[in-house]
Amino acid sequence: MIFAAATVELSRAALQHNAKKAREYAPKSKLIAVIKANAYGHGAGQVAKILAPEVDAFAVARLDEALVLRESGIKQRILVLQGFLQAEELPIFQQEQLDAVVHSEYQVELLEKSQLSGRLSVWLKIETGMNRLGVQPSQFKSLLMRLRTCVSVADDIQFMTHFANADDRKDPKTKQQEACFLTTIKGEAGDRSVANSAAIIAWPSAHLEWNRAGLMLYGASPIIGEKASSLGLMPVMTFYARVIAIKQVKKGEAVGYGSSWQAPKDMLLAVISAGYGDGYPRHAKAGAYVLVNNQLASLVGRVSMDMLTVDLTGCSQVNVGDKVTLWGEGLPIDEIANSANTISYTLMCGVTTRVKASWV
Ligand SMILES: *Cc1c(COP(=O)(O)O)cnc(C)c1O
């Protein structure tokens, strides 16, 4: 067998487990699995197939992402979180039975001008403090009335908003956004959705008719400073590479581009077969860990495109060809994200196409 230099192994069982966990956290709510950006880099088609029996609906960011899912045979409800931008998209939403998020007045106008043969399911999104997408609370009543009289819109209009700071259990803004949302829609009948992964875990009052779980399904922690494992989540993606060289360096010798790191003593190093060209973060700090034969080894020098280098001090029995874990099972992706001053979302999304992925 020829070893692949960089691979990701994706765990079906972990994905199913995390979906069940999302339900356990919020047993009264229906569950929307957010699988935008190719299911956070895990492969949207396969993730949707595995999750179809576990969830009530899917959400993607854009129309083209929804079409890929329909083509692969997904029959469930799919919310398109950015809705539509042009009149030409509306018949496609209708044909493919996609739910559209309406976040701006121009979209209401497009619906009013459209002549569809059927009616679209619409989620009216309200701006409550994120200042990204959503209609202002002051516009809400009049836009809702217009949507309700629009022949292209299905009767049961749903309401949603999105939290900016739900990942911080101490931040009062989440409660303020929730209150703003509830006040705005007061007296209006319709299903509601506000909770992302962080709110599913940390803000039970935000569990309404529908929740939208993204990150937690993939097994990373959506809460600042809390470990995924302590939240009951299991990593779906494990990123592997191989030891391709072992070398001795002397005290004071530099390793990698820019010679930014020098050995503080005579040391044994291993060169690992993955780098930023595979999606390992170039900005990971010296000291970030990898696992070599279940032993921690820390990064030294700059990450290059196809390789990175680690310190084998304290590791025993390491050989060329040994498998190395860069994140995932045994090495939380959140720790690597922290070492690179980023978030686990970007690492998952950033695994490149040359990395061979397989489901187990
Ligand atoms: C991406 C997204 C989500 C999922 O967020 P997670 O933090 O990954 O759970 C939910 N709702 C909206 C509107 C989103 O854009």
Image (cartoon, helix red, strand yellow):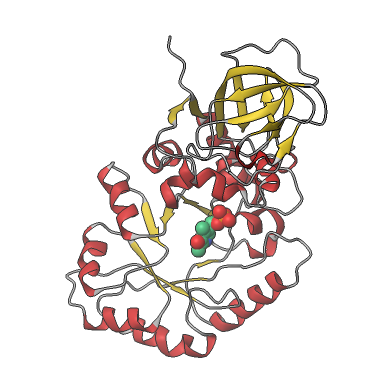
Horizontal side, residue 223 vs residue 349: left or right:
right
Q: Give how far across and how far down residue 235 sits, in percent.
A: 61, 35
Quarter of image, res 73 = top left
Q: Is residue 29 at all visible to an observer of this figure?
A: no
Residue at horizontal 70%, vertical 61%? 203
Q: Give how far across and how far down residue 140 sits, in percent.
A: 48, 85
Horizontal side, residue 131 vs residue 146: left or right:
right
Quick check: 124 above or below 139? above
Residue at horizontal 35%, vertical 86%? 146
- Total marks shown come to 0
Quick check: 220 above or below 86? above
Q: Give how far across and how far down residue 306 sits, in percent.
A: 50, 32
Q: Nearer the viewer, residue 321 or 115?
A: 321
Q: Nearer the viewer, residue 299 or 121?
A: 299
Q: Give how far across and how far down residue 17 sits, in percent.
A: 58, 35
Quick check: 239 above or below 99? above
